[in-house]
Image (tube, grey):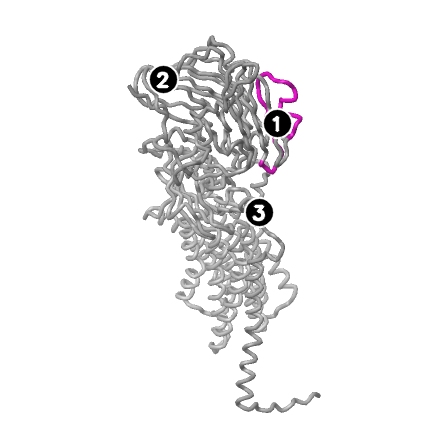
Amino acid sequence: MFINKAMSRRGFLKGTIGGAATLAGLQMLRFRRVAAQSGDEDPPGGMAHAGPMDGSPGQVGFQMQEDDPHDPAKILTDFDTGQVSTLPDGRTLREYEIIAYDREVEVAKGVTFPAWTYNGRVPGPTIRCTEGDVIRVKFTNASVMPHTIHFHGIHPANMDGVFEVIQLGEMFTYEFEAQPFGLHLYHCHVMPLKRHIHKGLYGAFIIDPKAGRPPARELIMVMNGFDTDLDGENEFYTVNGKAFYFQDYPISLKVGELVRVYLVNMTEFDPINSFHLHAEMFYYYPAGTSLAPAEYNDNIMLCQGQRGILEFTYRTPGRYMFHAHQSEFAELGWMGFFDVTE
Amino acid sequence: MIEQQPSVPAAPETKGRSMISALVLTVGPLLLLAGVIVAFLNTSAGLGFSLPVPVEKLDFEHVQVVPDGFRLTVRNAGQDPVTIAQVAVDDAYWHATIEPSPTLARLGQAAVIINYPWVEGDAHRIDLLTASGLKFEAVVPVAFESPRPTAQSLWGYTLIGIFVGIIPVFLGLMWFPALRKLNRTWLNFLLSLTMGLLIFLGVDATSEALELSAQVPGPFQGIGLVTIGGVVTFLLLETITQRQTRARRSEAAGRLTLAYMIALGIGLHNLGEGLAIGAAYVVGEASLGTFLVVGFIIQNITEGLAIIAPVLRDRPGFKHLILMGMLGGAPAILGAWIGGFSYSPVAATLFLAIGAGAVFEVAYEIARLMRADKLLASPLVNLGGITAGLLLMYITGIFVK
């Protein structure tokens, strides 16, 4: 019934002999497996739904330190607009600093993951600028493995972060003119790519249109997964790095205020991820590269590397859920609440 | 011829000194050993053992389906403490209560209580995630409420024990009058046959114990349990038999003792058998029960035969027969209770090994009796008897495999 997972490194270390030690007695017995007995007995019932609806599951609380950069709430509204100066030719220069280093991050209550990070958080910093700005990203690799930063968007070949692999202790500066406007992303592009991504090296990259967008409550949400036992499957799905975080700490919104969600999918291993908004509909701008919405929907599906901007306004106060509409992902951590007040 | 050197009595002070030096010589290496261990732990002796990830191991000792969810008993079979951080049922993280603490010390035990709307007849999978993200999986192959020790289920298990233990043993005993009419050769044959039965049972129990020992948590050393349970039981029973034999005067009394020892050995074996059946009922193998019970009745009827074989020439009396029957059969009831209500691979492995040691010893006692009794132990009859005993078990075994 349940597929045996391939031997994994950590699975090997566990050294278990076929997980279900449960059935201890069975093997010694001289019986065969029997089909289920049909039950005309009472259903096992009378119980209220005891699922992880009221506060997320976990044997301990979240273990964050005050100044931990790996903090979904901070990541939600943390837009790094860089050190701003003006170039001799009049263009705006924005300078950013990104350091790659390895650290354990907490990805669910009480569960840590040995991540490779940009600036100590998964996802990495959200780089924000305006179309036409010159951006200069000073990248330092303080991780044991070689890394790069590969930006999506338009830039010259030598700024693409594929062939110039940065080793431990080395530095590299990515510099190019930001274009086109929209919601993009960046990630490490060293082989094996899958590992460098699922270990946590990715982030959002926003280029605002010159004229800007209408004022709104702006939120950044990077959808991802964490394979904590390194068996090639995600144990947790999150937005901004911690399973069920926004269920325990709902995001406060106001009735009538325009909400803009910058949604990026960087989930590894699974082909797609999705975003479903409860009780309201959103306008959807794929990659944010057009000012005209492409869709009016309450559910959107994204492949890895796809991203888009969602705009919506709640009309009545209350608690609203948002989550991946793959129910499995939702129950493995990708679930949160908006608390909407007058 | 070598002449014995006359031993010279040592002077008192010399004796005292030699005591001290003996003590130093005994304790010295132990102190040095302690020193080496301390030095090794502090310096790791240049080997630099350290793993980048923790080696964690959780064993599920008991998985129960209760009306409002699941109850698991887990043990930390790894080297270091383990913290259970998350509990998922069928790929959905779920609230759970872990008692006494989600952190388990080495060999520590905890109960994981999950409130969950399980579905009758469905399969469920429960994953425990440790703080370092490792996953340990328990499977409920067919969900239905696990039997609890109520008066009703207690009676149910008692019935199982009666059917597989007491009834067949007593049925076997009922051959007593008929078998009394046998001549010496046939008696000899019957005793050999009993040995064959016991050897088969012993090998079977050993194999089951070894198979099960694989599921014993590492530090409890399943193979070690099998060895200790088997060898110690064998030697213990032998010691008891020898003392009994020495205390008795007549040969008849010796044979009666042997019959009791056979009953005890078979009883210990039936304890393990009852345990296996009880455990099977818990995990939902019950629907094969009728077939199985019939099989056990057929196979275990030979056990009654084994008990009476040594005393066929005597008049042991009704009381003794009843007592021996109970000794041989009743432990199946106890086994069924243990298997049904508090199954653990550790206990099951140990009990099976004890049963194996017991039946081997009893087979050995029969051989000794046959020699001591100067029963006409013709090799041909022995060959025939033992082979017949083995084949009898083999053929009746077809019903329970």
Residue A9 lies within the magenta run: no
* Residues in magenta, as a range: A142-165
Q: Amino acid at mark 3?
A: Leu
Residue farthest top in this picture: A292
Q: Which residue is mark 3?
A: B51
Q: What's the distance in space between the residues labelled 1 and 3, CA to CA?
A: 28 Å
B113 sits left or right of A148 in the view: left
Judge depth for marks 1 and 3 and give the one in front: 1
User: Is residue A5 among what the camera can see?
Assistant: yes
Q: What mark, if any, has residue A189 been given in the picture?
A: 1
* Magenta-drawn stretch, dominant element (helix, strand or loop): loop
Judge if badges 2 and 1 mark residues of a common chain. Answer: yes
| Residue situated furthest front in the rendering | A88
Q: Which residue is mark 2?
A: A279
Do discs 1 and 3 share a chain? no
Q: Amino acid at mark 2?
A: Ala
In the rendered image, is residue B399 in sight?
no
Taking the spot 68% from the left edge, 89% from the top edge, the residue there is: B3
Of the 4 image quadrants, the one containing the C terminus of chain A is: top left
Q: Secondary structure at mark 3?
A: loop
Position of residue A52 measured from the top left corner of the image (x, y, whole percent) = 38, 32
- Identify whether A9 is placed above or below A216: below
Q: Which mark is residue A103?
A: none
